[in-house]
Amino acid sequence: MRYVMSRLPRVSALLAITLAWAAVPATGAPHPARPNVLLIVLDDARPETAAALPATTRWLRDGTSYPQTVAATPSCGPSRATLLSGRYAHNHGVRRQADIGGFDHTRTLQQTLHDSGYRTAAVGKLYNDWPLDRTPPGFDRSALTGGGYDGAQFVVDGVRTRARYSTSFIGAQARRYLDEFERDDDKPWLLYLGFTAPHAPYTPQPRYAGRTFPGGADPSADEADRADKPAYVRKHHTTRAEGEAVRTGQLRTLLSVDDAIEGVRARLARTGELRDTLVVLVSDNGKQWGEHGLGEKFMPYGPSYRVPLRLWWPGHVAPGTDPRPASTVDVTPTVLAALGITPGYRPDGLNLRGADRHRWLLLEYWRDSHNGGFPTWSSRYLPGRAQYTEYRDARDRRTDREYYDLRADPWQLTNLLRGERDRTPDTRADAAALAAGRGCAGAACP
């Protein structure tokens, strides 16, 4: 089965979507030539976790939401390297958590903005396995943590400290950096805000410890017959109840994130920087809540790779929903295009506010002992249409495959490559496209 989505400009398609892509006329005082950038990165947050971010949602609702966004590699370290470089993991080299030492920091959003005259700071969780006492290249200042909530360790510009509660500390430190930036108001700034939440161990602040939420996992959490799934999936047995407990824990931690983000918004408003700031909200990957018996990420199923993505910049980013396929690989190219800055390298992603569109979305993952040994795989994903996945061994030999017709089966319950032979789809075009995608670079990427 074959689907085609052009990456070339499609004027008629753009006119049909609800979002106006032309910049909205600014009002009042003129904007600076280049805005500030606030990049908010959540950890393991599915799109549904917005239920615990009411104040943040109210703030950003006048921006653009991208409901068809995926994490190109649903694993913390590789995903963050993709977010900050606009390159797929097969190009930037951070395929596993421990690979960050080989990352080319010159090809990043922060280094590009730093070289363009921006002041830059990183607060919270950045890369796994990064030494906290070392400010990463491209950032002028840093206050980094490896994770945790109560009593989490931070290193603030070389000085070690303990936070009473990490989320509150991240918000407070962000405000401190903003006050510092305000004292030298002639330069724009980039502030990376990386929250630990809603990652495990899901420790809420006491005032949110009893909060409950309606809703839950999708119907695949009740999947009784998993004979069509690969062997590694069948070895896992996370129940719906266990998934619900994780979901509740995640949402409780996000209530504090909402408070911290609201504090940052209020500080920007007080200092007059709010309307001159481009805000990006995204997550590094999703999280399974018992779907298919799974309780992690790292797998080619929707709850693992679907993530929220919102852009907000008053007078420039129009309110609405953009239904086009999007990926974490697009974040850096989109931000740089909004600022009118051309990087010194060619990203693999697209400017989401431009006319190009993805033909399909590439998903990729490599076996990583840090993550529990989930197998290497890659997917050709067409949102709402189909997903074709190949698994590979250490010698890059194909070991298994999955194909889902997402129109008829949005929950990925029936792998059509394990069913009746006369119903097996023709996946030759999918396999060829995926083989090319796994080695693509720049404009050659789908």
Image (cartoon, rainbow, N blue to C red):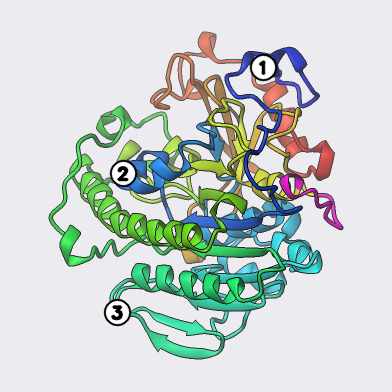
The foreground one among 269 and 323 is 269
Q: Amino acid at mark 1?
A: Tyr
Image point 12% across, 55% down: which residue?
210
Question: Is residue 129 in the magenta section?
Answer: no
Query: Is disc 1 surrounded by few (<14), some (14 to 19) or many (20+) residues within 10 Å?
Result: few
- Point out the residue furthest to the left here: 210
Q: How many marks?
A: 3
Sequence-wise first label, 1 or 3: 1
| Kind of element beneath mark 1 | loop
Residue 208, position in %: x, y?
19, 58
Q: Amino acid at mark 3?
A: Arg
Residue tagged 2: 289
Residue tagged 1: 3
Sequence-wise first label, 2 or 3: 3
Residue 358: image tag: none
Image point 30% across, 53% down: which residue?
250
Residue 93, position in %: x, y?
71, 61
Q: CA distance from mark 1 to mark 2?
A: 30 Å
The foreground one among 414 and 29 is 29
Cβ atoms under marks 2 and 3 closer than 8 Å? no
Query: Is disc 3 surrounded by few (<14), some (14 to 19) or many (20+) residues within 10 Å?
Result: few
Residue tagged 3: 164
Image point 70% across, 20% down: which residue?
5
Question: Is residue 342 in the magenta section?
Answer: yes
* Horizontal arrangement in the rendering, residue 108 relative to residue 237 (left or right): right
